[in-house]
Image (spheres, helix red, strand yellow):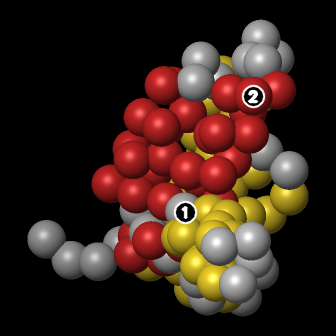
Amino acid sequence: MGITVTYINGYAFSHKNMAKKLICYALEKTSPAKRTMLHKKLYGYKDFSNHGKYTYKRLGLLTKIKGKKITDAVLLVKNRQAAKKIINLLHEYQAKTFVFDVLNKIKL
């Protein structure tokens, strides 16, 4: 079993490059408080203690799996396992999700 290579506009893409997933989500029926909680878990946030004397950067799931935010509610992740983690988090907050396989030359 060899590696399958596809040529598009002069660029060669192997299945390794095609493994990236584009995740789009919608939070139509989610309250603003739950939406904020989701975004904190997904993107991370800065935490301040002792009246701003100490600052901590709390990493989100997207940072931990080395994904990328393309625009509002559109994420790009490297593989199926990372996409599954994101989708599970989104489903906890009743988000509608749409997942697409993409050819990508962007280094994450």
Inter-mark Cα distance, 1 to 2 = 17 Å
Question: Callout 1, which amino acid?
Answer: Gly
Asked if residue 5 shows in the view, the reply is no
Q: Is residue 102 left or right of residue 28?
A: left
Helix, strand or loop at label 2? It is: helix
Q: Residues within 10 Å of mark 1 (few under 14, many from 20)?
A: some
At label 2, the amino acid type is: Ala
Residue 44 image position (x, y, % from top left): 62, 63
Q: Residue at 45% of width from left, 71% of height from top?
A: 64
Task: Please tell me which residue is depicted at 58% across the width and 24% down the height of the picture.
Answer: 93
Residue 66 appears in view: yes
Depth order, front residue of 58/54: 54
**Image mark count:** 2
Indicate whether 29 appears above or below 35.
Answer: above
Which residue occupies the foreground of this view, 105 or 37? Answer: 37
Q: At 75% across and 28% down in the image, what residue appears?
A: 33
- Please give the label number shown on residue 33: 2
Which of these two is toward me, 76 or 17?
Answer: 76
On-image quarter of the N terminus: bottom left
Callout 1 secondary element? loop
Q: Is residue 108 above or below residue 65?
A: below
x and y percent of residue 37 in the render? 64, 39
